[in-house]
Amino acid sequence: MAIKEAPLRPARFTIEGGVRQPEIQIPARKFWFGLVFLCFWLTCWSLGGVAALTALLTTPQPFIALWLVFWAVGWVFAASTILWQLTGSEIIRVDSGQLIHGWRMFGFSRERAYPLAKVRHMRINGSMPFAFNFSRGWGGPFMTRRMGCISFDYGASTIRMGQSIDDAEGRMIVKRLAPLLSEGAVDC
């Protein structure tokens, strides 16, 4: 019996733009079981919210009003997680002497700029395998600064990027960004 060679998987990210101003787009990782579960959960959660709102309008009670506030927070978090997995992407780009990191999702976006001269010790974190890291696709835009296999120091803060990629992809991105950073800013 012949042993079949494992296929090479292409990188999940894309690079657009020129050599001096690349824009790296990393699509959100899809966790299909979680998506199906969240869609079902959000449907039930919405029905519960409608029932609570009806009860509040019929007989006003402070507890139900407070519960609806927390219900709304849960609904927004679940809906944004679904939208993140279906339409979201993390963005890393270099423009006008700044490393810009952010996200885009369904017409919304947020970016933060870091002057290239202040980016220090860009490195690979050694991300946990996806099977044991369920939060990798769940947090969406709420978690983009707290997770990722690429990190760098910015003053007294550690900034993380690349929550939906593996270490090998992270090394490819760091290698692409290294010539644009100051001398010694990359550790790997």
Image: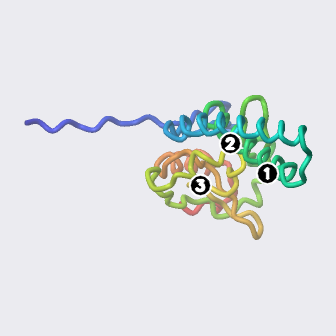
Q: Amino acid at mark 3?
A: Ile
Amino acid beneath label 1? Phe
Could you tell me how far apart the alpha carbons at marks 2 and 3 are, in whole angstroms? Answer: 26 Å
Image quadrant where residue 141 sits = top right
What x and y, as percent, mark residue 87?
65, 31
Q: Is residue 149 left or right of residue 55?
A: left
The residue closer to the viewer here, 187 or 5, is 5
> Dot 3 surroundings within 10 Å: few (below 14), some, or many (20 or more)?
many
The mark lying in front, picked from 2 and 1, is 1
| Colouring used for the render | rainbow
Residue 21 percent across, percent down from the top left: 71, 37
Q: Residue at x 19, y 36 (%)?
A: 4
Q: Please, what secondary structure does the residue beneath circle 3 have?
A: strand
Return the mark for residue 78: 2
Residue hosting label 3: 150
10 Å neighbourhood of mark 1: few (<14), some, or many (≥20)? few
Give whichever of 20, 143 is nearer the camera: 143
Query: 12 or 42, which lies in front?
Result: 42
